[in-house]
Image (tube, rainbow, N blue to C red):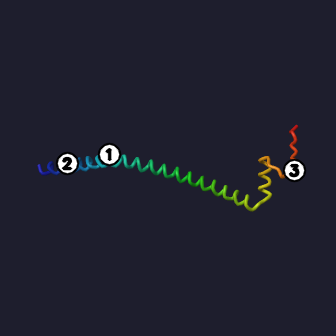
Amino acid sequence: MKYWDKIVTISWISLTVCTVSAGLLLIFLPELREYKENNKTISALEEGITKEEAKYQQLHKQQERFKKDPAYVEQIGHKMGMVYPHETIYKFADE
């Protein structure tokens, strides 16, 4: 009989541990999902930041070129259709 009492006691302890573990899993499962979603959002935002920083660097270089390179300013001005006073631009139609 002592043998069966030990088996019943161990069974109840095992059942209690499994029940508590399942309860804790149910409590923390939504938190784990939210944590994973937040990590995905953070990764996407960091990637966006990286892209925006690259754009910023490109625009900053272009801005510096506008400040230091008059030939570049003239080239961009001509592309936009600007001309110097008394300057004539001839455009040829492609054949």
CA gap, disc 2 to disc 3?
Answer: 98 Å
Q: Position of residue 60 (x, y in %)?
A: 66, 58
Residue pictured at 26% horizontal, 46% vertical: 19
Q: Amino acid at mark 2?
A: Trp
Residue pictured at 77% horizontal, 60% vertical: 69
Helix, strand or loop for disc 1: helix
The earlier-in-sequence mark between 2 and 1 is: 2
Q: Position of residue 88 (x, y in %)?
A: 88, 48
CA gap, disc 2 to disc 1?
Answer: 21 Å
24 with respect to 65 (left or right):
left
Q: Marks 2 and 1: CB-CB under 8 Å?
A: no
Residue pictured at 41% horizontal, 50% vertical: 35
Residue underneath mark 3: 87
- Please rate how many residues cluster around mark 2, counting C-alpha atoms within 10 Å: few if below 14, some from 14 to 19, many from 20: few
Q: Nearer the viewer, residue 93 or 13?
A: 93
Instruction: Select label 2 or label 1 by which is in front.
Output: 1
Residue underneath mark 2: 12
Helix, strand or loop for disc 2: helix
Q: Nearer the viewer, residue 23 or 14?
A: 23
Q: Amino acid at mark 1?
A: Leu
85 with respect to 22 (left or right):
right
Q: Nearer the viewer, residue 27 or 86?
A: 86
Q: Nearer the viewer, residue 75 or 81?
A: 81
Q: Marks 1 and 3: CB-CB under 8 Å?
A: no
Residue underneath mark 1: 26
CA gap, disc 1 to disc 3?
Answer: 79 Å
Quarter where residue 59 is shown: bottom right
Residue pictured at 77% horizontal, 55% vertical: 73
The earlier-in-sequence mark between 2 and 3 is: 2
Helix, strand or loop for disc 3: loop
Quarter where residue 56 is shown: bottom right
Mark carried by residue 55: none
